[in-house]
Image (tube, rainbow, N blue to C red):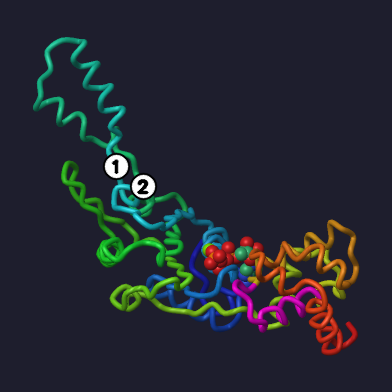
């Protein structure tokens, strides 16, 4: 499928994948697709940063290739490795067959047959349906040397394998990087990208998201759930609930046949929205009731 030709078309395409996208995010996504620039999404946990890459890939009918970052991630795991086990077997087989011609064997062992392609190299390969979406997820978890390496890979979309030569992407992949900002990512990398901070959604948008992801939830319950989670985000918590938690919670309540929140129901299901014991302990007892009362007083009758 061709790139959308307007911001509205981007929003529609994402809506088709049950992804609710505001004007600002729609604009930066449209620009990234149109200008062929990487999109750098930073923001709170569970606000839809990873999900948008999936929605773009599905919406455009492209392959999604994901590079999950972690501390200690190195080029071998990100780009390519040689399949040592297969190479050893080939050597043993050649030995058993008698007479090993070392020079010749070396040429044979370092061919694409023994190459294990990792995400960055896969993303350079032509794909049926067009350039893939390359999701470089949680880049803040890697270290700076890997970031510098990525910067280079993203600037020319090519990979050099000494034994094979340079592999160049015929069409650059659509690159989406995400970060939870556990550390600042280097300016040089950010400069290459279009940047967007993914904030918690507004009340209306979160209702829309819940409607898209848990359509079984009745309007009354959805409004209470979203208003309660939004109120929780203003509390002094160690880990605030994201959109993912809102959806999870609504699904838990549905599974329990809850039609309206009560302090008891909240206490029993807090584990769906808060994942730290200190936060849960804070919200137990009268606190949940206080917030629920507040929420009720602000919610106009649906
Ligand atoms: N705008 C949205 N439209 C539809 N669903 C959304 C949206 N935002 C979040 N979600 C839902 O929330 C879930 C979590 O989103 P996602 O995994 O993308 O969060 P994230 O920002 O990558 O979080 P983390 O930083 O923890 O990885 C998704 O699976 C999706 O169901
Ligand atoms: Mg994520």
Instruction: Confirm if mark 1 falls within 8 A of ligand 2.
Output: no
Q: What number is the disc on residue 233? A: none
User: SS for tag 1?
Assistant: strand
The answer, for residue 42, to whether it is visible in the render is: yes
At horizontal 43% and vertical 79% (from top left) the residue drawn is 195
Q: Is residue 198 above or below residue 67?
A: below
Residue 158 in the image, given as x and y percentages of width and height: 26, 57
Q: What number is the disc on residue 118? A: 2
Please give left or right for residue 38 compared with residue 188 in the image: right
- 294 part of magenta stretch: no
Residue 198 in the image, given as x and y percentages of width and height: 54, 77
Q: Determine which residue is flagged by label 1.
A: 81
Q: Is residue 38 above or below residue 64?
A: below
At horizontal 41% and vertical 58% (from top left) the residue drawn is 69
Residue 144, located in which quarter of the rendered image? Answer: bottom left
Q: CA distance from mark 2 to mark 1?
A: 8 Å
Magenta residues (range): 224-240
Please give left or right for residue 233 compared with residue 137 in the image: right
Q: Nearer the viewer, residue 138 or 103?
A: 138
């Amino acid at each position: 499928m061709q790139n959308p030709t307007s911001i509205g078309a981007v929003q529609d395409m994402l809506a088709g994948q049950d992804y609710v996208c505001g004007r600002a995010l729609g604009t930066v996504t449209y620009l990234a697709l149109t200008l062929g620039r990487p999109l750098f999404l930073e923001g709170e946990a569970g606000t839809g940063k990873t999900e948008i890459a999936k929605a773009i890939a599905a919406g455009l009918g492209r392959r999604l290739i994901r590079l999950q970052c972690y501390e200690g991630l190195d080029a071998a795991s990100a780009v390519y490795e040689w399949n040592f086990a297969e190479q050893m077997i080939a050597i043993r087989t050649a030995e058993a067959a008698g007479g090993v011609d070392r020079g010749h064997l070396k040429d044979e062992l370092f061919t694409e047959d023994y190459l294990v392609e990792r995400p960055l190299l896969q993303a350079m390969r032509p794909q049926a349906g067009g350039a893939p979406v390359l999701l470089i997820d949680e880049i803040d978890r890697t270290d700076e040397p890997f970031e510098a390496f990525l910067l280079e890979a993203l600037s020319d979309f090519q990979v050099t394998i000494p034994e094979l030569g340079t592999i160049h992407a015929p069409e650059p992949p659509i690159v989406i990087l995400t970060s939870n900002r556990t550390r600042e990512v280097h300016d040089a990398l950010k400069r290459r990208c279009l940047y967007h901070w993914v904030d918690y959604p507004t009340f209306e948008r979160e209702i829309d998201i819940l409607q898209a992801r848990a359509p079984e939830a009745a309007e009354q319950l959805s409004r209470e759930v979203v208003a309660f989670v939004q109120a929780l985000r203003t509390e002094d918590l160690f880990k605030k609930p994201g959109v993912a938690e809102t959806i999870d919670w609504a699904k838990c309540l549905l599974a329990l046949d809850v039609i309206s929140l009560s302090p008891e129901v909240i206490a029993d299901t807090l584990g769906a929205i808060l994942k730290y014991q200190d936060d849960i302990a804070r919200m137990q007892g009268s606190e949940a009731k206080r917030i629920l009362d507040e929420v009720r007083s602000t919610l106009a009758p649906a």
